């Protein structure tokens, strides 16, 4: 075997990492020994427990968080020629999902303190073509849903929460997942819980849940297991859908992970507390603002640094601190520039982006890891012009 550079990866304190226990492994193995690897009973079981966790009546499991956005936007009726308002600072998939459906993303600027979509920036972006407003619970902190809902309902436009970062967080005592018309989640390994790849949409609207189930499976109204139990081969394809199903293997992992999520969110908050304490009063390392009417999921711990960010990034990686950057404003990517978007669109997002640095946070991180991150970040930022 050639020696690969795994050691450098394992020496690094990563910015995020999954937590897998023996109970998770046993849950997956049990499915491997069963008759149903996909479209089986674990799908509905995961959907039920997830919906309950989010305080919502319906959950629809899909193959990843990007598919969740695609399915949710299709259910909201987004189509060719429509406009979808999305924040400038998010993962590209939030905007890409609108493009898949032939719609045009319209980028909203963010609040300078939290980097969450600025509700005050939305009104002037609304046009007769606006079909959907998308809020992103960036870093794990819920957006200002009271103002966002007010804005959406004033214009009669539905609100979608891309809550991929914020599973387990709350806004004014209400769980993420119950705050918008539709909410989407990702179960990629760095996210609050993992199924390898996976995603979910939750809603309290039964009709849109039904449409999403059809869309995730080719536009066919029944699944294989339903046909087997009805003793029928016949099926109807009523619209154009995709294969966005999540297998039972993944759902079993998700069920097992969900039980442990509250403890993981508490641990993420402990680590965030250590960081906040260490950087309180620092002029050149400033954590994003955390609002006191919400609880935070701390998918990411993001600071703004007053130094050359690319130099600091390089030095910290060399020192074994797996810092990262989330995110470049979406429209600055070449694909979107080629669509005609230009720098200057969202000045707050663009200026914040230059100074953003994501510090490691994940449930298995130790207090000693956090102390190491604090020491290295403090030293490197102070020594970098
Ligand atoms: C991770 C993520 C997605 C995409 O999820 P995948 O499961 O990776 O497809 C979408 N939006 C946000 C904000 C994310 O963080």
Image (tube, helix red, strand yellow):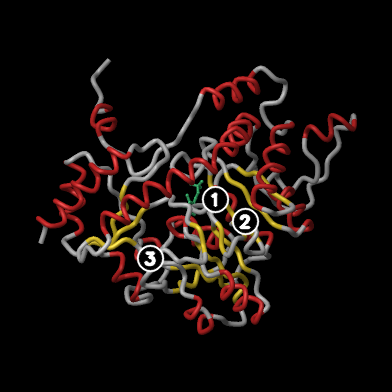
Does residue 353 appear left or right of residue 262 in this picture?
Answer: left
Q: Nearer the viewer, mark 1 or mark 3?
A: 3
Which residue is at 16% across, 56% downward? 381
Does residue 335 appear left or right of residue 86 in this picture?
Answer: left
The image quadrant of residue 5 is top left
Q: Give the CA distance from mark 2 to mark 3.
A: 22 Å
Q: Secondary structure at mark 1?
A: loop
Q: Is residue 235 visible?
A: yes
Image spot of residue 187 (x, y percent):
53, 42
Residue 177 circle label: 2
Instruction: Point out the image quarter for the N terminus.
Output: top left
Q: Is residue 62 above or below residue 335?
A: above
Q: Secondary structure at mark 3?
A: loop
Instruction: Point out the image quarter for the C terminus.
Output: bottom left
User: Closer to the N terminus: mark 2 or mark 3?
Assistant: 2
Image spot of residue 323 (x, y percent):
28, 48
User: Closer to the N terminus: mark 1 or mark 2?
Assistant: 1
Q: Residue furthest front?
A: 277
Q: Secondary structure at mark 2?
A: loop
Q: Residues within 10 Å of mark 2 (few under 14, many from 20)?
A: many
| Residue at the spot of label 1 | 167
Total tally of numbered discs in the picture:
3
| Residue at the spot of label 3 | 289
Q: Is residue 82 above or below residue 260?
A: below
Image spot of residue 383 (x, y percent):
9, 55
User: Closer to the N terminus: mark 1 or mark 3?
Assistant: 1
Q: Is residue 336 visible?
A: no
Q: Dots 1 and 2: beta carbons under 8 Å?
A: yes
The image quadrant of residue 128 is bottom right
Q: Give the CA distance from mark 1 to mark 3.
A: 19 Å
Q: Is residue 196 above or below residue 342?
A: above
């Amino acid at each position: 075997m050639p020696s690969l550079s795994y050691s450098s990866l394992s020496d690094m304190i990563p910015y995020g990492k999954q937590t897998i226990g023996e109970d998770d492994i046993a849950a997956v193995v049990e499915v491997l020994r069963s008759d149903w690897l996909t479209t089986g009973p674990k799908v509905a079981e995961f959907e039920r427990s997830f919906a309950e966790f989010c305080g919502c009546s319906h959950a629809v499991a899909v193959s990843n968080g990007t598919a969740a956005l695609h399915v949710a936007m299709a259910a909201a009726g987004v189509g060719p020629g429509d406009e979808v308002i999305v924040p400038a600072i998010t993962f590209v998939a939030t905007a890409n999902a609108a493009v898949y459906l032939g719609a045009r993303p319209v980028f909203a600027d963010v609040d300078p303190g939290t980097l969450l979509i600025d509700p005050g920036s939305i009104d002037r972006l609304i046009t007769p073509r606006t079909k959907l407003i998308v809020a992103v619970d960036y870093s794990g902190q819920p957006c200002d849903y009271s103002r966002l809902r007010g804005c959406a309902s004033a214009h009669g436009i539905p609100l979608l929460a891309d809550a991929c970062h914020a599973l387990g967080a709350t806004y004014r005592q209400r769980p993420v997942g119950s705050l918008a018309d539709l909410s989407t989640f990702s179960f990629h390994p760095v996210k609050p819980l993992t199924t390898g790849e996976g995603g979910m949409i939750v809603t309290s609207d039964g009709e849109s849940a039904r449409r999403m189930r059809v869309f995730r499976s080719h536009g066919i109204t029944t699944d294989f297991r339903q046909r087997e139990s009805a003793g029928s081969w016949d099926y109807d394809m009523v619209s154009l859908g995709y294969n966005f199903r999540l297998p039972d293997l993944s759902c079993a992992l998700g069920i097992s992970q969900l039980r442990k999520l509250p403890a993981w969110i508490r641990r993420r908050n402990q680590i965030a507390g250590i960081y906040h304490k260490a950087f309180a009063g620092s002029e050149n390392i400033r954590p994003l603002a955390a609002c006191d009417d919400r609880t935070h999921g701390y998918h990411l711990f993001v600071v703004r640094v007053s130094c050359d960010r690319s130099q600091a990034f390089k030095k910290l990686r060399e020192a074994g601190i797996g810092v990262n950057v989330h995110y470049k404003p979406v429209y600055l990517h070449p694909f979107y520039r080629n669509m005609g978007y230009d720098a200057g669109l969202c000045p707050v997002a663009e200026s914040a982006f230059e100074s953003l640095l994501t510090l490691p946070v994940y449930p298995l991180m130790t207090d000693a890891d956090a102390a190491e991150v604090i020491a290295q970040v403090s030293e490197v930022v102070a020594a970098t012009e």
